[in-house]
Image (spheres, rainbow, N blue to C red):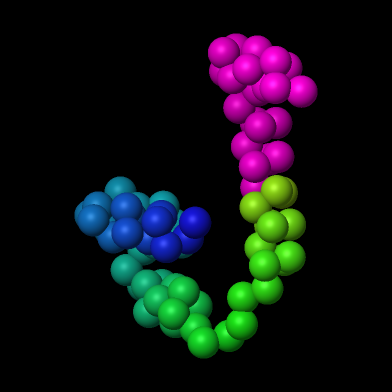
Amino acid sequence: MQIVQFVAEVKKPDGERLPQYHEAGLESLKFQLLSPAPVYPSTEKLYLAAVLDSARRSWAKTMPTFKRSCRAAM
């Protein structure tokens, strides 16, 4: 997910980017994204599940349509 966000953010002027994508931190971020370190699928699944659960909780509070669709899916 970070790669997709990276591509979207670097197209914007520095002042409009999310904090972690400002010009000052791009080299470090590129290093992390392109690292030869192994990717562990089980860890990635846990991370993705946590992010999606967090989004669901946050959006359900502010978006009535999203809240109804979450109830229908469960």
**Residue 46 coordinates in the image, percent (x, y):** 73, 57
Q: Is residue 45 above or below residue 57?
A: below
In the shown orientation, is residue 26 left or right of residue 10?
Answer: right
**Residue 17 coordinates in the image, percent (x, y):** 34, 53
**Residue 58 coordinates in the image, percent (x, y):** 65, 31
Q: Residue at x 69, y 57 (%)?
A: 45
Residue closest to the eye, 35 or 16: 35
Is residue 1 visible in the rendered image? The answer is yes
User: Quick one: quadrant of the C terminus?
Assistant: top right
Is residue 15 visible in the rendered image? The answer is no
Q: Is residue 36 above or below residue 44?
A: below
Is residue 2 within the magenta segment?
A: no
Examine the image and state in which quarter residue 40 appears.
bottom right
Is residue 71 within the magenta segment?
A: yes
Magenta stretch prevailing secondary structure: helix
**Residue 67 coordinates in the image, percent (x, y):** 65, 17
Count of all numbered marks drawn on residues in the image: 0
Examine the image and state in which quarter residue 55 appears.
top right
Q: Residue at x 63, y 17 (%)?
A: 69
Q: Residue at x 61, y 82 (%)?
A: 38
Residue range (magenta): 51-74
Quick one: which residue is furthest to the bottom in this view?
36
Q: Residue at x 32, y 68 (%)?
A: 23
